[in-house]
Amino acid sequence: MKKNFLLLFILPLIIYGQNNSYPYTKIDTLKGSNTEYRDWWDVKKYILTVEPDIISKSLQGTNEIIFDSKAVGTMQLDLQEPMQIDEIFTDNNTKLSFTKDGDIYLIDLKGHIKNYSSNNKIIIKFSGKPKLANNPPWDGGWIFTIDNDNNPWVTVACEGIGASVWFPCKEYLGDKIDGGMELSIITSQKGVGNGKLISNSSINKTKNIYTWNISNPISNYNIIPYIGNYVNFSDTYNGLKGKLTLNYWVLPSNLEKAKDHFSQVKKMLKAFEYWLGPYPFYEDGYKLIETPYLGMEHQSGIAYGNQYLNGYLGNDLSNTDVGLNWDYIIVHESGHEWFGNSITCKDLADMWIHEAFTTYTETLFTEYFYGKDKANEYIIGQRNLIENEHPIIGNYGVREKGSVDMYFKGANMIHTIRQEINNDSIFRDILIGLNKEFYHQTVSSKQIENYISEKSGIDFSKVFDQYLRTTNIPTLEYYQKGNELIYRWNYVVPEFTMNIKTSLGNLKPSSNWKSMRMPKNSSLYDFKVDKNYYINTINTTR
């Protein structure tokens, strides 16, 4: 019963595209591709100001976009209805005309910038009532609510739906905001953002403007204002790159509870810096901000709503109780600082890069503090949440995510690859190497796949094809004939090969039947495959 409850409980957390086959429209392509309206300009910086109206649940603001260009053409900006762009200006105050097609705005910049020019700027004024999230963070949008003391509590969750749900931007994962940004929040409450607070000033008798600076590259969906009656406490962590500033913004009634519970952050950082290399955003610090929803991996400003409980709201997703030793949101969402926020997929179809590796960081954390046996028990236990209904990788160029199996199946694929490498020193070097090679970059699945194959010295191309691009699980078929074990892979892609450890020795099956002489006095009753491989086994005794 507990297992079924957890399945129903967790799956809404990971609702994504399911590789549906339907005719894609021009708008799908405009939203999901690096089109002719996007490929000629590169975002360097945003200077974003937002002022929510809590009574009307509306927003107004400006976004100054600084960009480099290699040509001059029509620029695409994205802003989802019912939000709207009111006006667009150049930096010399020339008003620009634009056309609108649903959520897409096209601006003709010919005559306003030059070919191969840098630090161009346009200023966009926007306003409207943004989409409200009915069930955040699974259903994206703004959240206007109140805390337990009836104070306003406002924020947004937009990873799936996109940042254009609330501000005009280049909604394309392949173009990070390279030069960082400034986020200013105008509010009568406290306004918390990503990065570091650089100014806080009064603009009238009732409102302040809080300005936060993000110095590292950042993706649009990670930019989040948090507004509430927050109190703050801070700490430092002596890490691989020196002193890392830790800041926590929580509701006053939870202050003492947070001071105790958030001590887990230093343990998380110690384990992850061992396995993955330095925390990727030392310059911007690390923050947890209490939110009215469960959590999200907003860069250097993680949303926290796990109610100061270990596990996932007090439950263990692996159904083993191993996950009750630590807070799921602190560990999982922080893992995204490495995979997701520093290493970012160029296309939503490859979001397994974010979720599979980050889900596996839970296993790595467990191994660091509780040992390898507990870690293996945890990752194997997560298999009860794998569906195998759709491939992990989605369709490219149309803003479609792959299946929910990017989490638990993806993590078990990584664990299986680790068994094949059979050298934890090399495996750790690969994880650290990924975070060096692709530090603060956007990548494709093939780049990650090729790196792992190259650094391990093992061609994993067919393994990736099998687990990422099909729903079939490699199945080891075997039977005994006399004193020989006969075995092969079935339900695999052509030329699939992978070594496996068994109780009778190591095997390297292929799609063709192979045989091995069994040890004297042994039988199939003695034959077991190492459970750390995510495969199926079938005794086809004939």
Image (cartoon, rainbow, N blue to C red):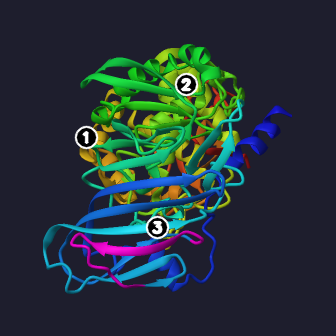
Magenta region includes residue 400? no
Left or right of 384 in this view: 257: left
Report the residue marked by disc 2: 375
Given residues 303 and 473, the one toward you in this image is 303
Distance CA(mark 3)–CA(mark 1): 38 Å
Given residues 503 and 66, the one toward you in this image is 66
- Please tell me which residue is depicted at 59% across the width and 34% down the height of the picture: 529
Q: In x, y percent, where is residue 175?
A: 33, 62
Identify the amino acid type marked 1.
Lys
Report the residue marked by disc 1: 436
Identify the amino acid type marked 2.
Ala
Element type at mark 3: strand
Distance CA(mark 2)–CA(mark 3): 48 Å
- Can you see residue 415? no
Tell which circle, 2 or 3, labels the residue nearer the N-terminal end.
3
Left or right of 337 in this view: 150: right
Element type at mark 1: helix
Would you identify the image quadrant in which residue 235 lies? top left
> In the image, which is nearer the foreground, mark 3 or mark 1?
3
- Please tell me which residue is depicted at 29% across the width and 52% down the height of the picture: 441
